[in-house]
Image (cartoon, rainbow, N blue to C red):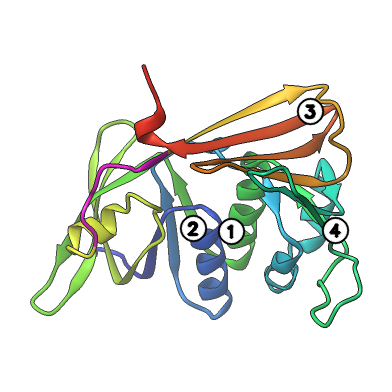
Amino acid sequence: MTKVWDAVVVGAGPAGSATAAHLARAGLDVLLVDRSRFPRDKPCSEYLSPGATPLLERLGVAEEVERSAHAKLAGMKVVSPGGTVMCGRFAATHPYPSPRPYSYALPRTTLDGILVRAAARAGATFRDGVAVENLSYDARAVSGVIVRTGSGRWEALQARVVIGADGLRSVVARRLGLRRTSPPRRIAFTAHVADVAGVDGMGELHVGRSGYVGMGPIGGGVTTVALVVPLARVRP
């Protein structure tokens, strides 16, 4: 007899893993799939703001994230195109107190692994290296997904609900006609740079007239640098 999952969650990033964890805790039979093999890295600023703390606590991973964070940032420094510098600290006194006086800096390999394990502890089944290629339908609605495994085998997975948490180029959204693929207008580059002078305990955002650079220490004398510019400005 073909197994029918209560929910198949497509994409094991933060949104997908958190969704799978909450559904599994509610007693549902949940399958979480991702096309990549874990652990896997992703281009990211590797910055988790204090506002995420209540969400991490609800998932039961706040302490693990704090232990795993390679660095903590006390606030942000923003530099305008004209050179004006604005600094804000999370511990500052104002009408909107931060849940914590610092943010976390940790790689996506670490964060995503923590969240996937939380989903599994809650009772969800996780399968990596499984790419959703299409949706299946019954007479009324979506009834599951068609996947290709890492070995090239095709499978039909049945589900009462399919949740697309597979990001900017979501296969689920495209197959439902909810999103049209359009050429990107901006491009991002990320790198880890050692021994950057003057970066100490604060995240930085240097804003230009057509792009920006984000920087933040991640521990061990290493700084994450992320550059975002219009694609039209990039030359081969």
Secondary structure beneath disc 1?
Answer: helix
Residue at (87, 32) in percent of width and height: 198
Classed neighbour count for the residue bearing mark 4: other residues with Cα under 10 Å, few (<14), some (14–19), many (≥20)? many
Measured from the top left, where is residue 84 in percent x and y?
75, 48
Quarter of the image where one finds residue 136 = bottom left
Q: Which is closer to the viewer, label 3 or label 2?
A: 3
- Cα distance, mark 3 to mark 1? 32 Å
Sequence-wise, the earlier of marks 3 and 2 is 2
Which region shows up in magenta?
179-186
Secondary structure beneath disc 2?
Answer: strand
Sequence-wise, the earlier of marks 2 and 4 is 4
Instruction: Give the residue pinned by disc 3.
Output: 222
| Above or below 10: residue 27 | below
Instruction: Give the residue pinned by disc 4.
Output: 102
For the residue pair 204 and 19, the one nearer the viewer reads as 204
For the residue pair 34 and 173, the one nearer the viewer reads as 173
What label sits on residue 120 in the rendered view?
1
Instruction: Give the residue pinned by disc 2.
Output: 125
Secondary structure beneath disc 3?
Answer: strand
Residue at (68, 26) in percent of width and height: 192
Sequence-wise, the earlier of marks 3 and 1 is 1
Mark 3 residue type: Val
Give the residue furthest to the left.
139
- Cα distance, mark 4 to mark 3? 18 Å
- Cα distance, mark 3 to mark 2? 35 Å
Q: In this image, 226 relative to 229: left or right?
A: right
Measured from the top left, where is residue 175 in percent x and y?
19, 58
Kindly report the secondary structure that dominates the magenta region of the rendered protein: loop
Classed neighbour count for the residue bearing mark 2: other residues with Cα under 10 Å, few (<14), some (14–19), many (≥20)? some
Quarter of the image where one finds residue 220 = top right
Asked if marks 4 and 3 touch (Cβ < 8 Å), the reply is: no
